[in-house]
Image: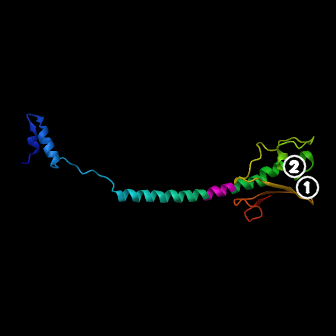
Amino acid sequence: MKTSKSDIFVNGRVRVQDMKKQCYQGQFRHKQAAFTLMEMLLVIVIIGILVGGLAVSLSGRSQEAMITRARADVKSTLALALDLFEQDIGRYPSDDEGLDALINDPGESKWKGPYLKTDLEPDPWGNAYEYSLDPDNSRKYQLRCAGPDGKMGTSDDIES
């Protein structure tokens, strides 16, 4: 026996039994919009590819920024501090004093440091900057950073 919608209402009231019967017969079922498992997996794969590409792109820029910072440290910040030290003391720090003489008084009466605002930090890759006074000319020094590979004497070294 099939009931119509008008049969559900009796004297303005809904008959629950008839309502249940119609629900089970599928008259009130609505198809709900949903994604299939394949569609969800496809979206997840696409998002993964986009995130992976973004990470690769950003890591390249991060490396460029680190190289730029190391160049600025070697050619500007540390070089300026060494020049200020030389103006005050009349010489550059010895190899034994090293860059530490820019922060800590090496026992010179003319020392007016510290010549750096902060403690001497390692290069962007966590390695120490290398300082050496020219043995033939005490008015020259060499300041180096090992660069991204962390090894001195390779093509990616940054020098003053």
* Nearer to us in this view, 99 or 75: 99
Judged from the image, the secondary structure of the residue bearing numbered disc 1 is loop
Q: Which amino acid, by three-letter code, is at mark 1?
A: Arg
Residue receiving disc 2:
97
Residue at point 14% right, 41% down?
19
Viewport quadrant of the C terminus: bottom right
Main SS, magenta region, reads helix
- Residue furthest to the bottom in view is 155
- The reply, left or right, for residue 12 in relation to residue 41 is left
Crowding at dot 2, Cα within 10 Å, few <14 / some 14-19 / many 20+, comes out as some
Residue at point 9% right, 45% down?
4
The magenta span reads 60-66
Q: On screen, 135 above or below 27?
A: below
- The reply, left or right, for residue 58 in relation to residue 25 is right
Residue 61 placement (x, y as % from top left): 62, 57
Residue 91 placement (x, y as % from top left): 91, 50
Crowding at dot 1, Cα within 10 Å, few <14 / some 14-19 / many 20+, comes out as few
**Residue 63 part of the magenta segment:** yes
Residue receiving disc 1:
139
How far apart marks 1 and 2 lie (CA) works out to: 15 Å
Judged from the image, the secondary structure of the residue bearing numbered disc 2 is loop
- The reply, left or right, for residue 76 in relation to residue 87 is left
Residue 94 placement (x, y as % from top left): 89, 52
Residue 59 placement (x, y as % from top left): 60, 57
Name which quarter of the figure residue 117 lies in.
top right
Q: Earlier in the sequence, mark 1 or mark 2?
A: 2
Mark 1 or 2, which is nearer the eye? Answer: 2
Q: Are marks 1 and 2 in contact (CB under 8 Å)?
A: no
Tally the numbered discs: 2
Residue at point 8% right, 48% down?
2
**Residue 111 part of the magenta segment:** no
Q: Which amino acid, by three-letter code, is at mark 2?
A: Glu
